[in-house]
């Protein structure tokens, strides 16, 4: 439930409410607004009557949150969540583009792509060091060596780095090297892993599971938020349907639906949602038109020889073209690409 404090409630009154929340074996989550403080009391709250909090000093009203996900819901947090990453913000007016190879394949390989995507206008670099491959005989990633190369790429380009974490045992080392932890589609309901990244304060990019509903995605986000990690980006990456012309089916609907249900930033991964490089630009434009807050795109200097996901990888030249087109769509929906000075997109 949400306990809405009166405007001007004192720190002591807020602390007093928090004590009562803990007495009920619930966890308090405080949102300090400009005018009012709202305190979420989450846990098994259905058996706790609202009257426990209603009469406390400084409390204005108490409301139950109707959705099964609480901290992720717009009801609890009506304004968009906006948070900074190195050099740009996520979830606000700016649209962020993360780009890079599916996997880090070597030092010169990742350094070259990092410089190319930066040059084209990317705001962050992606690259897998631990890869979730369908076959155990396929390239599994370079592990820690790959993380070291990613860190060097960040040093050279200034781009923050996004990489997938597949196991709890990898979290400690990964948080030393990367700026955003990606939870892959196959791990969206690995609840122990979600809890463990919720204990960190490293931003998380949470991908939708292959056959997960939007509500299941939000429940997974709730696991991370309830651990106190509020920096969660949701990522639609295509779902399994009967269609075989593309690798997955992009659920464009998910973008406005998620924007209505949650305050969390919503990204699209058109590389995995289509599986084919030829469609990535079209679907990127559709996503921005539909209200996405960002994109994560696979780029490789030699897609035909990529060690993973070559078919869906763009060349740096194709990626530069995508950025130019997406920039125009962003302007049409009164947004702008991060890292681009306002005057460069909107002539005054
Ligand atoms: C990836 O980003 O390379 C990846 C494996 O994505 P997903 O988990 O969405 O399949
Ligand atoms: Mn991939």
Image: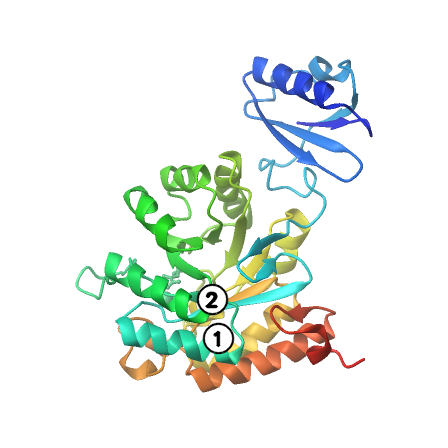
Q: Quadrant of ligand 1?
A: bottom left
- In the rendered view, tell whether residue 340 sits above or below residue 233: below
**Given contact means CB atoms under 8 Å apart, are the residues at marks 1 and 2 in contact?**
yes
Q: Position of residue 290 (x, y in %)?
A: 65, 66
Is residue 238 shown left or right of residue 255? Answer: left
Look at 36% across and 65% down and name the residue there.
127
Residue neighbourhood size for the residue with mark 1, other residues' Cα within 10 Å, grouped as few (<14), some (14–19), many (≥20) = many
SS assignment at label 2:
loop
Question: What number of labels is visible?
Answer: 2
Task: State which quadrant residue 253 falls in.
Answer: bottom right
Q: Is residue 76 visible?
A: yes
Callout 1 secondary element: helix
Q: Furthest-left residue in view?
A: 137
Structure colour scheme: rainbow
Q: Quadrant of the C terminus?
A: bottom right
Q: Which mark is residue 118?
A: 1
Q: Residue at x 65, y 47 (%)?
A: 261
Q: Residues within 10 Å of mark 2 (few under 14, many from 20)?
A: many
Q: Please give the name of the residue rendered at 42% of the width and 59% of the height, measured from the top-left corner.
A: 162
Disc 2 within 8 angstroms of ligand 1 (CB): no
Q: Nearer the viewer, residue 142 or 260?
A: 142
Q: Residue at x 48, y 38 (%)?
A: 223
In this figure, which residue is indicated by the disc labeled 2?
159
- Give residue 337's quadrant in the image: bottom right
Q: Is residue 143 visible?
A: no
Out of 258 and 93, give the one closest to the viewer.
93
212 lies above or below 8 = below
Instruction: Give the CA separation, mark 1 to mark 2.
Output: 7 Å
**In-image side of 115 versus 105 (left or right):** right
Does the Cβ of the disc 1 residue fall within 8 Å of ligand 1? no
Residue 284 rendering spot, x and y as whole percentages: 56, 73
Q: Tell me the quadrant of the picture where the N terminus can be found.
A: top right
């Amino acid at each position: 439930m949400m306990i809405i404090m009166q405007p001007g409630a004192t720190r002591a009154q807020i602390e007093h409410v928090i004590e009562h929340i803990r007495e009920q074996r619930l966890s308090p989550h405080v949102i300090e607004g400009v005018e009012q403080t709202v305190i979420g009391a989450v846990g098994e709250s259905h058996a706790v009557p609202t009257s426990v909090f209603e009469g406390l000093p400084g409390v204005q009203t108490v409301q139950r949150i109707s959705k099964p996900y609480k901290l992720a819901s717009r009801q609890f947090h009506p304004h968009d969540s906006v948070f900074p990453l190195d050099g740009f913000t996520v979830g606000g007016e700016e649209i962020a583009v993360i780009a890079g190879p599916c996997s880090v394949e070597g030092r010169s390989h990742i350094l070259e792509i990092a410089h190319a995507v930066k040059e084209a206008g990317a705001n962050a670099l992606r690259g897998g060091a631990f890869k979730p491959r369908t076959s155990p005989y396929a390239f599994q990633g370079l592990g820690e060596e790959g993380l070291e190369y990613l860190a060097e790429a960040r040093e050279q380009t200034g781009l923050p780095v996004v990489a997938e974490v597949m196991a709890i045992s990898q979290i400690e080392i990964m948080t030393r090297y990367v700026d955003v932890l990606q939870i892959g589609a196959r791990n969206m309901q690995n609840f122990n892993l979600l809890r463990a990244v919720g204990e960190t304060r490293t931003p998380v990019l949470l991908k939708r599971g292959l056959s997960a509903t939007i509500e299941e995605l939000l429940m997974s986000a709730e696991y991370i938020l309830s651990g106190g990690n509020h920096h969660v980006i949701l990522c639609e990456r295509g779902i399994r349907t009967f269609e075989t012309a593309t690798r997955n089916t992009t659920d464009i609907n998910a973008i406005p639906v998620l924007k209505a249900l949650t305050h969390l930033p919503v990204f699209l991964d058109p590389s995995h949602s289509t599986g084919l490089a030829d469609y990535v630009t079209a679907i990127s434009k559709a996503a921005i038109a539909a209200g996405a807050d960002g994109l994560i795109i696979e780029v490789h200097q030699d897609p035909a020889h990529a060690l993973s996901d070559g078919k869906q990888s763009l060349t740096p030249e194709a990626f530069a073209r995508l950025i130019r087109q997406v920039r125009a769509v962003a302007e049409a929906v009164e947004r702008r690409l991060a890292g681009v000075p306002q005057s460069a997109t909107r002539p005054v």
